Amino acid sequence: MSAPAVFAFNNALVRTPCHAIVNGLRAVDVGAPSYQTVLAEHKAYVEALEAAGVAVEILPALDAYPDSMFVEDPALVFTEGAIVMRPGAQSRFGEAQEIAPVLRRRFSRVIDLSGPGFADGGDILVLKDRVMIGLSDRTNETGAHALADALRALGKNPEIVKTPANVLHFKSDCSLLDETTILSTKRLAISGVFEGLKVILTPEGEEGAANALRINDRVFLGSAFPKTRARLEEAGYQVIPLATSEIAKVDAGLSCMSLRWWA
Ligand code: CIR
């Protein structure tokens, strides 16, 4: 039997947004997100995952960690096992120890990323033949090398690359559309990291659309990006637009809110 596609998922973990999300980290303060609207965005996201055929486990809110709804950052998961990450923002470091017991319950193999470096899940792009690790303000060289070792232990092929300056995470600027196609901002694509792959660029002014999420037969896309939607539909993708206006105020997008794997 052939292996499932790299975008085939039937399981996901998410975490209920906590009230403290209004104090979530952000590079530029455009005002606090509305808690009620964050909850609505999160609920619609969970429903979209379920509609795509994914069994979703919803973890309880963690008020001690404002950004804890973004479960993608403190862990990395694969069919073969999970990695407990070392988040690079001080206020988020403890999230890893909160999610570790959940990973131990759900995966038979769990690797704790070794210190002293840091690495965030948002910097990791999983492709069919390799796993890209973007160096950023949250993922440093030491963390990236430790992560590369952990990935090799799971049978993966790591590749360390660079995130453009002033971009939070590598995946803030790109996402996988299928096994040979990437959605990317121009500023990331021109660095040449995706050589050999097909790249669809986000139209100018819609850079935030790059953090999309391919799940099974569909692509989740921020609903504020109609030009990107048209571009993807023209290319034959089934697009599911999802509201992200409030989570965008704390620099988040669609990949950040879940950990996804095929079991
Ligand atoms: C942070 O700065 O860590 C959060 N406010 C946003 C995290 C977004 N996560 C992601 O892109 N994977």
Image (spheres, rainbow, N blue to C red):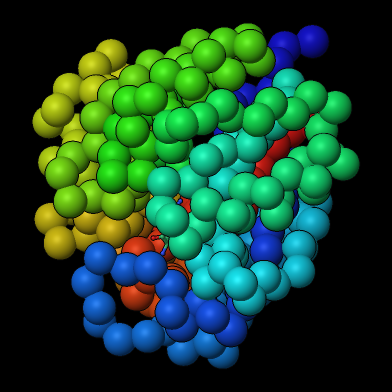
At x 61% / y 55%, what residue is drawn?
95
Q: Measured from the top left, where is residue 96 in percent x and y?
A: 62, 48
Image quarter of the C terminus:
top right
**Viewer can see residue 63:** yes
Q: Is residue 223 above or below residue 50?
A: below
Q: Position of residue 250 (x, y in %)?
A: 38, 70
Q: Where 162 falls versus 242 (above or below)?
A: above
Residue nearest the observer in this picture, 225 or 144:
144
| Image-based side of 42 in relation to 125, left or right | right
Q: Residue at x 58, y 63 (%)?
A: 68
Asked which quadrant contains residue 228, the reply is bottom left
Q: Nearer the viewer, residue 172 or 64?
A: 64
Residue 185 or residue 218, whichever sits in front: 185
Is 146 situated left or right of 155 in this image? left
Residue at image coords 82%, 38%: 104
Which residue is situated farthest in the front direction here?
Answer: 116
Pick the quarter of the image with the N terminus. Answer: top right
